[in-house]
Amino acid sequence: MAILRSLSFSHISVIFLAIISIQCGAIDEERKVHIVYMGALPESQYSLTSHHINILEEVVEESNATESLVHSYKRSFNGFAAKLNDRERQKLARKEGVVSVFPSRSLQLQTTRSWDFMGLTETVKRVPEVEGDVIIGVIDSGIWPESESFSDEGFGPPPKKWKGACNGGKNFTCNNKLIGARTYTDLGPDNTARDTVGHGSHTASTAAGNKVKDAGFYGLAQGNARGGVPSARIAAYKVCAEGGCSDADILAAFDDAIADGVDIISISLGSSLAIDMNGILTSHSAGNSGPGLGTTASVAPWLLSVAASSTDRRIIDKVVLGDGTTTTLVGTSVNSFDLKGEKFDLIYGKNASLRCSDDDVRLCKNGCLDANLVKGKVVVCDEVSKGEEPVHARALGTIMIDNRFNDFGRIYPLPATLLIPENGEKVKSYMNSTRNPQANILKSEAIHDSIAPVVASFSSRGPNVIIAEIIKPDISAPGVDILAAFSPLASPSGIKSDKRSVKYSIMSGTSMACPHVTGAAAYVKSFHPEWSPSAIKSALMTTAWPMNATKNELEFAYGAGHIDPVKAVNPGLVYETLKSDYIQMLCNINYYDSWRIREITGERISCPEASQGSAKDLNYPSMGVMVTGEKAFKSNWTRTVTNVGSANSIYKATVTSDPKLQITVNPDVLSFQALNENKTFVVTVAGGELPDNTVYSASLVWSDGTHSVRSPIVVYTN
Ligand SMILES: *[C@@H]1O[C@H](CO)[C@@H](O)[C@H](O)[C@H]1NC(C)=O
Ligand SMILES: *[C@@H]1O[C@H](CO)[C@@H](O)[C@H](O)[C@H]1NC(C)=O
Ligand SMILES: *[C@@H]1O[C@H](CO)[C@@H](O)[C@H](O)[C@H]1NC(C)=O
Ligand SMILES: *[C@@H]1O[C@H](CO)[C@@H](O)[C@H](O)[C@H]1NC(C)=O
Ligand SMILES: *[C@@H]1O[C@H](CO)[C@@H](O)[C@H](O)[C@H]1NC(C)=O
Ligand SMILES: *[C@@H]1O[C@H](CO)[C@@H](O)[C@H](O)[C@H]1NC(C)=O
Ligand SMILES: *[C@@H]1O[C@H](CO)[C@@H](O)[C@H](O)[C@H]1NC(C)=O
């Protein structure tokens, strides 16, 4: 246990990554990048890299060890990444000092009204001096340093604690706003931290961009663009380019970001990479693999896992059919093209090719459309796409019909809109009814959406497939139709032939939701610089707006609900989780037994022989349990809250519950006499037989009349 306690938080996180990687990784003979984890930094860090090369030399077969080495991790933990085949990997795993070896996977980038929508208006109270000391590390596709969102007008020198560097490569200059940059992508001698895909500039400016007047995408969503904490500093760590990103590079960026002195890390990548450490809160996108259950890869309890939801501003796009009755159909897309009211010939994809089968061509599959038939026309396709095929076939525009992805607007390389099938049928019957069907696709417009916030279909859902009792995602934030800074080198539609170049663009994804939570966490931190990551996370979760449960995914879609940054500054009570609690949880869930890596079960970590607890004992701001279907059950959660509101206060518990659950709280009154005082209580839930694959939700609210501290409770069957 002594060794256990001496392990720093970061190491647990790396180990957690190992668990997930092992579960996903396949054995392979090819030489692939592996991460070799060697535990805590040794006392003397002198020549750690040559030590790594020496170890490698003893195992690599025909190749050169120096060339096999991809990264040497030596600033925040000890280890390296190297290209290894399976035999080399096995040899290395048996070496002394090596804790674990696991494959590095390739990840994809997931693809402002929003701050006002959640109540963080331009006039909210701020502590600019403290806000200016907050450093946000953005691990992403780099950044566009010349963007107005990152200009340093009015900024003083970087905070004293900053130990980072501006290693952005050729022609890359930092300033007092963008205080650091590093790059891990291998793009040859011209490699820079400059963003060429737009994603990293978008996420960084959403979290902490300056207020920029009159920003918009071709006049759409025009207004002030700003981040959650416009006075905070940004450090950009470029780990992704067009080709994606890898675990090995992301770990290298973490190694540096921690040592550089960042306060909050924002990581909007489709990764199960699970790291939070050394007092740094990491907000992480839940993923874009929804709406199926169990699709989120952001499972670790020390991460703040973020779902994406809509705001009250949506971007829509109308189609006018030329049948004299001016039938107007509303679709979704972010369409900057203005066809000036002119109507163009419509052609159904099915009628637009001699090459492909009817089924392929009606979906406008790649290579199917015949340019002679579609050139200058609007082609109707029975499936949503990125618009690549209609552009290649020189269509003037496209109307896509699909029942998926209708809840956000995508940018296409040509005039385009996406219709739900019901409206698509109207287009088709109009086409049947006339010899010369025509239509116009209008430029997009912004509309007010009164049912927001609703979790987007693409947002990954819980439950947590690794630790069933930890509800994931934790929280929801705006991730639909978000305007933020972009890279002028990137194509706004992501299609190469689209030559538009913009400084601001509209994107949707959990990637866009994550930096909203990063900004909100920084905002809370600017009022409470001494708060731990778990206190900030608890404050954000327990003050979230309850969301409208219209689907049966409930909390598995939105966690504690929609983020409310202003309320989170003054939560009243917080659920604190210490490093030792996370270690205890890892022991409780018996991962050590299931780890087949002998090195991990060996000298570095030892759990008590028989662990009595379970993951639901972790002092988490939400409460979850999975029970056996068709069987009566009884379960409980023990929680401790810390008073951060008023010294003398009395909190009373209120439970709101699905009628199938019987929930009691003991004690149901908590009397505090001092700040930072802790009180413990037990929540017990019981119920009869529940059907398989069902989810039941409830909530516990502690209230002293001023503060309302809400925790979701979820009981589900497998
Ligand atoms: C290995 O590669 C490095 C860098 O490419 C080179 O400096 C070194 O001489 C090589 N060593 C051997 C033994 O080939
Ligand atoms: C540096 O990059 C900026 C932005 O792409 C460009 O406008 C400028 O010409 C570049 N300067 C040099 C010396 O390459
Ligand atoms: C259009 O006509 C075709 C046959 O010519 C028919 O199969 C299809 O169902 C019709 N579509 C609509 C929407 O009326
Ligand atoms: C496809 O072409 C056929 C034959 O030219 C025509 O009868 C039919 O109406 C067309 N269908 C659509 C949907 O345009
Ligand atoms: C929840 O959503 C449903 C369906 O959109 C709506 O009818 C209902 O009024 C909403 N409830 C609340 C409390 O907003
Ligand atoms: C909570 O449940 C455990 C068994 O899961 C039981 O041992 C314990 O007594 C329960 N605690 C309370 C306060 O009911
Ligand atoms: C309350 O609990 C926290 C976290 O366990 C601990 O750090 C703190 O010292 C406790 N406060 C008091 C007054 O004991």
Image (cartoon, rainbow, N blue to C red):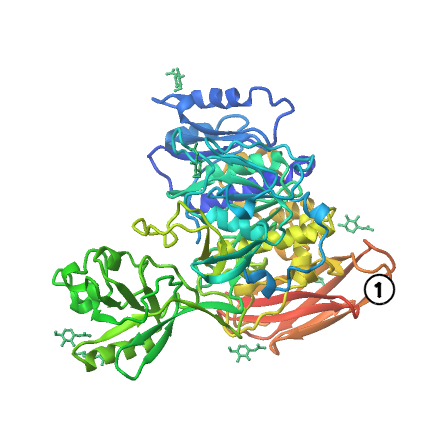
Residue 18 vs 683, above or below: the answer is above
Residue 65 vs 619, above or below: the answer is above
At 39% from the left and 47% from the top, the residue drawn is 490
**One can see residue 334 in this view:** yes
**One can see residue 272 in this view:** no
Residue 480 x, y percent position in the rendering: 48, 62
At 37% from the left and 33% from the top, the residue drawn is 86
Nearest to the observer: residue 202 or residue 631 = 202
Residue 109 x, y percent position in the rendering: 43, 49
- In the image, 655: left or right of 379? right
Kindly identify the amino acid type of the residue bearing the numbered disc 1: Ser
Residue 522 vs 631, above or below: the answer is above
Nearest to the observer: residue 200 or residue 671 = 200
- In the image, 29: left or right of 480? left
Nearest to the observer: residue 635 or residue 33 = 33
Q: Name the residue under label 1.
A: 649
Q: In which quarter of the image is the N terminus?
A: top right
Q: Quadrant location of residue 668? A: bottom right
At 14% from the left and 61% from the top, the residue drawn is 372
